[in-house]
Amino acid sequence: MSISNASTSGLRTAIEQAVNHFVQDDDFLVVTDFHLHLDADTGEVAIADDTEMTISSAIVEEWVDLDGDEDMEAMARELKSILSAMSAEGAFEHVSVSKPFSFVLEDDNQETIDELFYVDEDLIILSDDLLKDMDKDLDDFFEKLMKE
């Protein structure tokens, strides 16, 4: 499920507003993550901080009445793509949020559905696609190493 350019632009603006909500101040770093909540009835994506205060929001018409895991996975992929592009453009480099911080997709009960994007100064988190067989590969490597 792809979304329109207008919806993508609205999401980017909401994310920028949330990140820019924390004004650059060398003496004070906010410790927070960004929590994204979808209201499936209206298509509104609200972005909140750790105190559950909504900082910004955007309406994505294509996400009205989303239902089921496949729709949520498609939505998460779209959000990951937007966040990744914004990171590549340097959108998260000058925020006054203590690193590391994350963008997390949550359900109505504030349970984590997916960690969308992780920002750290020295660490880059690879996508699940690249890591899906990593456990097995590491186990095989360790087993081979122990035999030698």
Image (cartoon, rainbow, N blue to C red):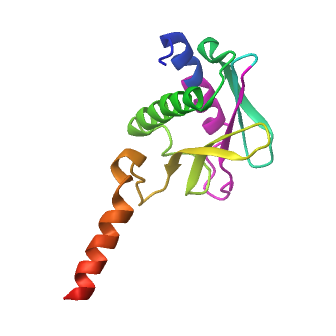
Q: Residue 30: image x %, image y %?
A: 69, 54
Q: Position of residue 70 (x, y in %)?
A: 55, 29
| Residue 132 visible at all | yes
Task: Residue 69: give x, y in percent of width and height.
Answer: 60, 32
Residue sitting at x 54%, y 33% = 73
Count of labels in the image: 0
Q: Residue 125's spot in the image, x, y percent?
A: 42, 53
Picture quarter containing residue 46?
top right
Q: Is residue 85 magenta?
A: no
Q: Is residue 32 magenta?
A: yes
Instruction: Tell me the magenta residue range.
Output: 12-40
Left of 127 or right of it: where is 47? right
Closer-to-camera residue (24/93): 93
Front-most of 142 and 52?
142
Residue depicted at 49% across the width and 28% down the height? 78
* Residue 146 vertical placement versus 123 (above, below): below
Q: Residue at x 61, y 38 (%)?
A: 19
In depth, the one of 98 and 12 nearer the eye is 12
**10 lies above or below 108:** above
Indicate the quadrant where residue 144 lies: bottom left
On screen, 51 above or below 60? below
Image quadrant in which the C terminus is located = bottom left
Residue depicted at 30% across the width and 78% down the height? 142
